[in-house]
Every structure is written in C-alpha cells, then in structure tokens.
Image: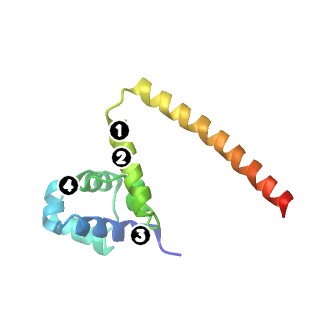
Amino acid sequence: MKDHTCSITENIRRAREERGLTQEALAELAGISHSHLSKVESGSRTIGMKTYIKILEALEVVPVLVSEADGTEKSIELLSRFLCILKECPELELQFYLDTIESMKGSLSKIALSNNDNDDKVA
C-alpha cells in the first residue's frame, strides 16, 4: 500500500501538469516559494495543511480529488459540478441539501440491501 503523503504529492504534481502549469507558475498562484513546492512534490518536505490548501485553491481542485488516486474521471467531473453549485448556496440551503442527501443515501442503501436479499432468494 502506498504512503498517503506520497500519493498526495504525486497527485498534486499530476494535477499541476494536467493544467499545464510549471512549478514556478503554481508556486506563484499558491503564494509559496518555488523551492518549497519543488520539495513538496519530490517528497523531501512534508506538506502542512495551510500549504496544502493554498496549492489546492491555486489548482482549483477539491482535497478529496487530489488525495484519492483511484477516482474516476466521471466521479471527479460530477463532484466538481456539485461543488460549484454548492459554493453559491447560503448556509441554510447547504444544510437542507446535506440533510436531503443523507436521507436519500439511507433510503438508497436500504433499497440496495433489499435488492440483494431478493437476488439471493432467486439464486
């Protein structure tokens, strides 16, 4: 199993390259030094939370998208769209959406379990 920190730094580099950014350009956007970013990407320096957030904001990505190496393109696209919508919402509306999603997720889990039980009976 990969070291989690290594996975994060590899994915930061990958996200930077996918956006066509040099280390210098990303460092400038993130407000950190080029040498700091270079050391973070190479794994010779650990990444602190403040630096991590600055880099993610400069890359315009969500932390889970950078830290989850196994995410699919479609999942990433859907999450990005979802987060763009949520950025515009007031707190009360966000709470409503969260409650709704949690409720629906619970219902969908029950339906999936029910369907699995029915599949077992047919087999």
| Callouts 3 and 4 close, C-beta under 8 Å | no
Residue at (26% x, 71% y) in the render: 39
Camera-side residue of 84 and 15: 84
Q: Secondary structure at mark 2?
A: helix
Q: CA distance from mark 2 to mark 4?
A: 23 Å
10 Å neighbourhood of mark 3: few (<14), some, or many (≥20)? some
Res 30 label: 4
Q: Quadrant of residue 106?
A: top right
| Callouts 2 and 3 close, C-beta under 8 Å | no
| Callouts 1 and 4 close, C-beta under 8 Å | no
Label 3 vs 4, first from the N-terminus = 3
Name the front one of labels 1 and 4: 1
| Callouts 2 and 1 close, C-beta under 8 Å | yes
Q: CA distance from mark 2 to mark 3?
A: 24 Å
Q: Secondary structure at mark 4?
A: helix
10 Å neighbourhood of mark 4: few (<14), some, or many (≥20)? many
Res 7 label: 3
Q: Is residue 16 above or below residue 87?
A: below
Res 85 label: 1
Name the front one of labels 2 and 4: 2
Image location of residue 19, percent across then percent down: 22, 63
10 Å neighbourhood of mark 1: few (<14), some, or many (≥20)? few
Q: CA distance from mark 3 to mark 4?
A: 20 Å
Q: Secondary structure at mark 3?
A: helix
Label 3 vs 1, first from the N-terminus = 3
Label 2 vs 4, first from the N-terminus = 4
Label 1 vs 4, first from the N-terminus = 4
Image location of residue 46, percent across then percent down: 35, 66
Which quarter of the image is occupied by the C terminus? bottom right
